[in-house]
Image (tube, rainbow, N blue to C red):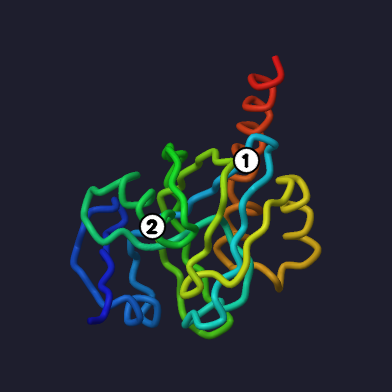
Amino acid sequence: MLQKVIVVDENNKKVSLKEKNAVHIDGDLHRAFSIFVFNQGGELLLQQRSLEKYHSAGLWTNSCCSHPLLDGAGSEEAESRLRDEMGFSCELKKVTRIKYNLRLKCGMIEHESNDIYQGVYDGEVLINPEEACDYKWVNFSEVLDDLSRNPQTYTEWFKYLLLETPLGSALSASITVQSAQRDG
């Protein structure tokens, strides 16, 4: 069965359901979520997308990203997807929602109303090989630096979210506060 995603209007109100591939070909605005998981040391968990993915295969990206299947499911669905892709769950807090319209090298379009979640986790990671082929924990400032130096190794949405929106600064500030609370 083909997976469907939630097509929305500019106010994030559901318009219809549409097959995932068709949405990415036609460029319809649709719901998505992106998860950024940090460890207590302030390192961000990155995943390398499976080489079998229909777009952006083999590229590094945020901890987990997907499309909600249920209207209004929120963090529960994001936590479930994180468990499916990376083999663990943690409490996720919604940080913001960011809309973007990005053309991928393969010609597909990521036109998303993307809910951004952040979590903290220090345990074992067990990647689902259908979703990711590798993972690593990286110092957040090093991630930001490498995004600028080696953009070809990262997904378009990951680069956009961290380099062209206030999200990168907000996550950096949150890590600083978390570190101060831990150390203080």
Classify residue 79 as left or right of residue 170: left
Identity of the residue drawn at 60% across and 68% down:
155
Q: Spot the residue most to the top.
A: 184
Classify residue 59 as left or right of residue 120: right
Say if 106 sits above or below 86 in the image: below
Mark 1 residue type: Asn
Q: Position of residue 96 (x, y in %)?
A: 45, 42
Tag 2's secondary structure? helix
Q: Could you tell me if the residues under marks 2 and 1 are in contact, i.e. CB atoms within 8 Å?
A: no
Disc 2 target residue: 81
Q: Position of residue 157 (x, y in %)?
A: 55, 63
Quarter of the image for the N terminus: give it. bottom left
Mark 2 residue type: Arg
Identity of the residue drawn at 66% across and 38% down:
172
Say if 35 sits above or below 6 in the image: above
Classify residue 31 as left or right of residue 36: left
Identity of the residue drawn at 63% across and 45% down:
168
How crowded pointer 1 is (Cα within 10 Å; few <14, some 14-19, many 20+) is rated as some
Say if 151 sits above or below 19 in the image: above
Seen from the viewer's position, the closer of residues 55 and 127 is: 127
Q: Position of residue 123 (x, y in %)?
A: 57, 44
Q: Earlier in the sequence, mark 2 or mark 1?
A: 1
Identity of the residue drawn at 43% across and 37% down:
93
**Residue at mark 2 to residue at mark 1: CA–CA distance:** 19 Å
Disc 1 target residue: 39
How crowded pointer 2 is (Cα within 10 Å; few <14, some 14-19, many 20+) is rated as many
Tag 1's secondary structure? loop
Q: Position of residue 35 (x, y in %)?
A: 49, 51
Quarter of the image for the C terminus: give it. top right
